[in-house]
Image (tube, rainbow, N blue to C red):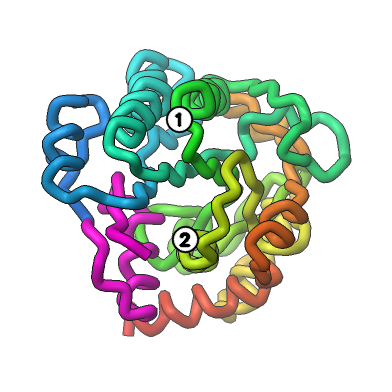
């Protein structure tokens, strides 16, 4: 495969990549500290690349606080756009391929149709716009890139919707969950496996791809599934997004078409509920 460098190693996806690398016995992989892999410090990045000489760089670093980004525009822009641009420059100077993680939030999501890679991207919040601008910066500067847009990421690591629901379900008798925002949950372990499959395929096809688990659901039905699988007794009420106003507007429908990534790299994608069962079993195992 050649040496793989993980940027944003301490985050949710970074931890999942580490887990999957161990399962696959991939040893030629580096997980630098946040300081050594600081995407806002191009001088440090250059030092890191000269030292490690990676063939592949996986960028998991991102500003992902969607609501907070509306007021923290400068930092979101720095990490999601300038940081991505810095990585593209350093990858180009060191002949490395960049695998960059993006989001379904680059889309407006106001029509019920599967979103394809070449559909018009028009973000409706700061987070989505900064991630889109990061994509554009990479595509402009670096030919050797694979941008993977994903959605509703969760795992046994870090903070995410599944872990929040399990916590709230254990504390409360009743929860109100938004039912009119539709998308696809993605188990970050599955995404990590897909990334290694892409690297291991030796298929030099660059560009933008979509990856989430298979299927479609709402946040309400996602929560119901979490409680059913975990055998948590809690009443869940469906509510419209208008009843739970947030600082950032969310796409109402952001289900992505994954045909391109499946056919290009011969990747099989698990159904979202099957992966959720595995994740909850893993969370229970870690807790036990």
Question: Seen in the image, is 6 located left or right of residue 99?
Answer: left
Q: Could one spot residue 165 in this view of the protein?
A: no
In the rendered image, the vertical position of residue 43 relative to residue 16, given as above or below: above
Displayed quadrant of residue 277: bottom right
Seen at 41% across and 28% down, the residue is: 80
Seen at 73% across and 47% down, the residue is: 256
In the rendered image, the vertical position of residue 280 relative to residue 243, given as above or below: below
Seen at 49% across and 40% down, the residue is: 145
Contact check, label 1 and label 2, Cβ < 8 Å: no
In the rendered image, the vertical position of residue 14 relative to residue 196, given as above or below: above
Q: Quadrant of the N terminus?
A: bottom left
Residue position marked by numbered label 1 in the rendering = 142
Q: Could one spot residue 90 in this view of the protein?
A: yes
Number of residues whose C-alpha sits closer than 10 Å to that of mark 1, classed few (under 14), some (14–19) or many (20 or more):
many
Residue position marked by numbered label 2 in the rendering = 199
- How many callouts does the rendering have? 2
- Secondary structure found at label 2: helix
Q: Is residue 7 covered in magenta?
A: yes
Rendering coords of residue 171 (x, y %): 45, 63
Label 1 – label 2 distance at C-alpha = 17 Å
- Secondary structure found at label 1: loop
Rendering coords of residue 72 (x, y %): 38, 18
Rendering coords of residue 269 (x, y %): 67, 68
Q: Which residues are magenta?
A: 1-30
């Amino acid at each position: 495969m050649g040496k793989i460098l993980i940027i944003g190693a301490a985050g949710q996806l970074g931890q999942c990549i580490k887990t999957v690398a161990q399962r696959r016995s991939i040893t030629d992989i580096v997980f630098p500290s946040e300081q050594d892999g600081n995407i806002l410090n191009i001088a440090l990045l250059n030092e890191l690349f000269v030292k490690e000489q990676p063939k592949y760089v996986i960028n998991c670093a991102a500003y992902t606080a969607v609501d907070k980004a509306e007021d923290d525009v400068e930092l979101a822009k720095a990490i999601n756009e300038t940081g991505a641009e810095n990585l593209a420059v350093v990858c180009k100077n060191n002949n490395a391929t960049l695998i960059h993680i993006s989001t379904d939030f680059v889309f407006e999501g106001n029509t019920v149709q599967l979103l394809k890679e070449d559909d018009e991207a028009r973000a409706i919040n700061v987070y989505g716009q900064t991630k889109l601008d990061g994509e554009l910066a990479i595509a402009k500067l670096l030919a050797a890139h694979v941008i993977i847009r994903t959605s509703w990421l969760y795992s046994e690591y870090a903070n995410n919707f599944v872990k929040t629901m399990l916590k709230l379900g254990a504390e409360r008798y009743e929860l109100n969950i938004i039912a009119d925002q539709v998308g696809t949950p993605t188990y970050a372990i599955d995404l990590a496996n897909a990334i290694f499959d892409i690297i291991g395929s030796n298929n030099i096809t660059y560009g933008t791809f979509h990856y989430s688990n298979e299927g479609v659901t709402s946040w309400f039905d996602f929560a119901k599934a979490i409680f059913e699988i975990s055998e948590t007794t809690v009443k869940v009420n469906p509510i419209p997004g208008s009843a739970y106003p947030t600082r950032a507007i969310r796409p109402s429908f952001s289900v992505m078409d994954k045909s391109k990534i499946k056919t290009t790299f011969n990747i099989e994608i698990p159904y979202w509920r099957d992966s959720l069962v595995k994740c909850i079993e893993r969370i229970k195992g870690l807790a036990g």
